[in-house]
Image (spheres, rainbow, N blue to C red):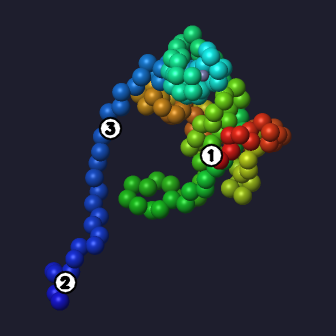
Amino acid sequence: MSEATEPVRFMQQVISLDYVTKVSPVSRAFGRALLEGRIVGHRCPQCSLVYVPPRGFCPICVVETTDADEVPVADRGVVTSWTVLTPIQYHGQTERHDYALASILLDGADGTIGQQRLTDVPLDRIRMGLRVAAVWAADADRESTDARGYGFGSAITGFAPSGEPDADRALYEKHTL
Ligand SMILES: [Zn+2]
């Protein structure tokens, strides 16, 4: 059998995709607060749960939340779970070393925010209950936050250990996976 008649089993091609995302007014307000170095959530007027980032509604009570429900949330909290990623060196990959992404329960929030980069901590020292604080980008580097409209955009580059004692398990237990 010649090479030409072999079935194609694998193809590799580099493509480029541009996304245009419509940012909701709620996300825009969240992004504007980030530019000022603040994290805000929405407190449900019925069940009092605080959502970060705000969604504009409480899915449990099925009620709308608005600017009037905005509450400040701390830029520090507790690691509830994490994943260590080993980057595959595909085209365009800029990561070279293992790193960790964590879910973090911010003080004053009732839900975790996921996919947060952990910095300044050896991978084998990461644990549930570890207290961490946001590492804010310099003011000039926060500009794309509003356009992205989700997560912390470019405003927060990661979370680093705050030096506080580990949190009591009872405080975050229901948020662990
Ligand atoms: Zn609610």
SS label for mark 1: strand
Q: Residues within 10 Å of mark 2 (few under 14, many from 20)?
A: few
Mark 1 or 2 closer to N-term? 2
Q: From what the image shows, is residue 61 above or below residue 167?
A: above
Quarter placement of the N terminus: bottom left
The mark found on residue 102 in the picture is 1
Q: Residues within 10 Å of mark 3 (few under 14, many from 20)?
A: few
Residue type highlighted by circle 3 = Tyr
Q: State the image coordinates of residue 35 (x, y, percent, origin top left).
A: 53, 23
Q: Mark 3 vs ligand 1: CB under 8 Å?
A: no
The mark found on residue 3 in the picture is 2
Mark 3 or 2 closer to N-term? 2
How many numbered markers are drawn?
A: 3
User: Circle 3 sits on which residue?
Assistant: 19
Q: CA distance from mark 3 to mark 2?
A: 39 Å
Residue type highlighted by circle 2 = Glu
Residue type highlighted by circle 1 = Ala
